[in-house]
Image (spheres, grey):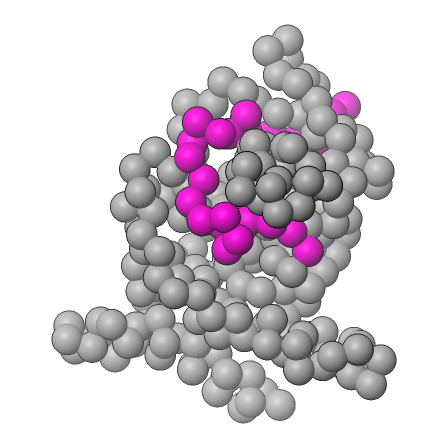
């Protein structure tokens, strides 16, 4: 099993660096994120900040993260100065998605993954940025925080309605997208349960209402 995991990960890494063959690089490069916390802080809202409820499981990594029915309201900072990779934002759902599904929330949560000037793609369920592996807790396809191996180890495949569809999800591929100026590329943490840039493309920064800074005390 250990050898199988190494093989699978190696295939992903090779995919992320295929376009760099002309540079003679034979080892993958990584982008890490040491600043984004795994656990959301609890804060006292300031006057200019506002609180919202969020009861969808789109950001669930196994502990009902961001679900206010399990935690307190989310505190949103509207007067942010910049966006960093890993920031969770509260934004206006694009009209294109509301037209397709009027039942969608008008405001939504997503995590900033791609920044202006970067090229984002997904290969075998792994996010790559500028041909580098995004080696973070939010950089690959997960179900409630579990990767493909962990998920099928916990869940009996015979109880899954369509096992191949689930495996296809874990090995999702997306063509490269260049993030334009004044836009971001956003993903929910549980890709299969939410709407994000995989569906509507780049998100204009003007549609962002604010950044999530914590749960309300």
Q: Residue at coordinates 72% horizontally, 60% vertically from top-left?
A: 144
Q: Is residue 152 magenta?
A: no
Image position of 177 with respect to 40: above or below: below
> Which quarter of the picture shows residue 89?
top right
As drawn, 57 above or below 216: below
Which quarter shows the C terminus?
top right
Please give left or right for residue 90 compared with residue 17 in the image: right
* Number of marks: 0
Q: Among all residues in the image, which is located at the extreme top?
A: 47
Residue pictured at 62% horizontal, 47% vertical: 100
Quarter of the image where the N terminus is located: bottom right
Say whether residue 1 is left or right of residue 203.
Answer: right
Question: Is residue 34 visible to us here?
Answer: no
Decide if residue 3 is in sight here. yes
Q: Position of residue 188 (x, y in %)?
A: 59, 50
- Could you tell me which residue is drawn at 41 percent across and 41 percent down? 184
Query: Over which residues does the magenta segment extend?
Result: 193-217
């Amino acid at each position: 099993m250990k050898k199988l995991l190494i093989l699978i990960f190696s295939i992903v890494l090779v995919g992320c660096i295929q376009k760099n063959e002309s540079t003679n690089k034979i080892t993958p490069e990584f982008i890490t994120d040491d600043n984004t916390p795994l656990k959301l802080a609890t804060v006292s809202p300031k006057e200019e900040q506002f609180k919202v409820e969020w009861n969808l499981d789109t950001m669930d990594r196994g502990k009902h993260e961001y679900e206010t029915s399990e935690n307190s309201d989310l505190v949103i900072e509207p007067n942010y100065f910049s966006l960093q990779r890993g920031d969770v934002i509260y934004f206006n759902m694009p009209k294109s998605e509301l037209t397709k599904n009027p039942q969608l929330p008008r405001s939504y949560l997503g995590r900033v993954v791609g920044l202006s000037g970067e090229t984002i793609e997904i290969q075998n369920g792994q996010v790559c940025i500028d041909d580098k592996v995004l080696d973070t807790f939010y950089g690959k396809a997960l179900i409630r925080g579990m990767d493909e191996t962990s998920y099928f180890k916990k869940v009996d495949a015979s109880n899954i309605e369509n096992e191949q569809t689930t495996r296809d999800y874990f090995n999702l591929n997306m063509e490269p997208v260049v993030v334009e100026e004044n836009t971001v590329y956003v993903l929910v943490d549980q890709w299969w349960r939410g709407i994000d840039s995989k569906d509507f493309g780049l998100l204009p920064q003007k549609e962002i209402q604010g950044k999530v800074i914590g749960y309300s005390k």
